[in-house]
């Protein structure tokens, strides 16, 4: 299992074990309720998913880089759903 797969698996476990739906998880981590996850909000998600503090900043940047389709450096609900769909496959 690659590092990316390992991280995505941990995120999936967090969402499955602590939230009824992926949307509930998204709303929980969207601390400012603007409908988008910022880098710091993604870091909080990664912390809850037990991703090492050492790599949280790198991983949050890579997640934004990989899933931010509109280029605003934030993850909106549709982009979050795309990530969740990739995890589920």
Image: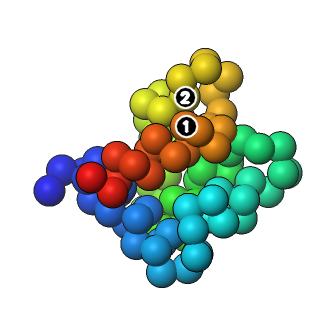
Residue at the far bottom in the pictured view: 17
What residue does disc 1 label? Answer: 79
Residue 60: horizontal and vertical position, in percent? 51, 43
Residue 85 located left or right of residue 49: left
Q: Is residue 61 visible?
A: no
Local crowd size for mark 2, using a 10 Å CA cut-off: few (<14), some (14–19), many (≥20): some
Residue 51 located left or right of residue 5: right
Local crowd size for mark 1, using a 10 Å CA cut-off: few (<14), some (14–19), many (≥20): some
Residue at the far top in the pictured view: 71
Q: Is residue 86 visible?
A: yes
Q: Nearer the viewer, residue 88 or 64?
A: 88
Residue 75: horizontal and vertical position, in percent? 62, 38
Which residue is rendered at x = 40% and y = 72% of the image? 13
Which residue is rendered at x = 44% and y = 45% of the image? 83
Q: Examine the image and state in which quarter residue 73 appears.
A: top right
Which residue is rendered at x = 83% and y = 43% of the image? 34
Residue 5: horizontal and vertical position, in percent? 26, 53
Up/down of 11 relative to 78, above or below: below
Checking the image for residue 37, the label placed there is: none
Q: Which badge, 2 or 1, is on the more N-terminal residue?
A: 2
Question: What's the image's color scheme?
Answer: rainbow
Assign a secondary structure to mark 2.
Answer: loop
Which residue is rendered at x = 67% and y = 22% of the image? 72
Checking the image for residue 68, the label placed there is: 2
The quarter of the picture where the N terminus appears is bottom left
What separation in Å lies between label 2 and label 1 (alpha carbons)? Answer: 6 Å
Assign a secondary structure to mark 1.
Answer: helix
Which dot, 2 or 1, sits closer to the camera? 1
Residue 44: horizontal and vertical position, in percent? 63, 60
């Amino acid at each position: 299992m690659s590092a990316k797969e390992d991280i995505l698996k941990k995120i999936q476990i967090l969402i499955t074990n602590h939230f009824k739906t992926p949307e509930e998880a998204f709303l929980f981590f969207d601390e400012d309720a603007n409908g988008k996850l910022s880098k710091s909000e993604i870091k909080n998600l990664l912390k809850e998913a037990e991703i090492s503090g050492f790599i949280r900043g790198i991983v949050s940047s890579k997640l934004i880089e990989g899933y931010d389709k509109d280029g605003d450096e934030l993850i909106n609900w549709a982009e979050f759903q795309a990530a969740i769909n990739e995890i589920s496959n």
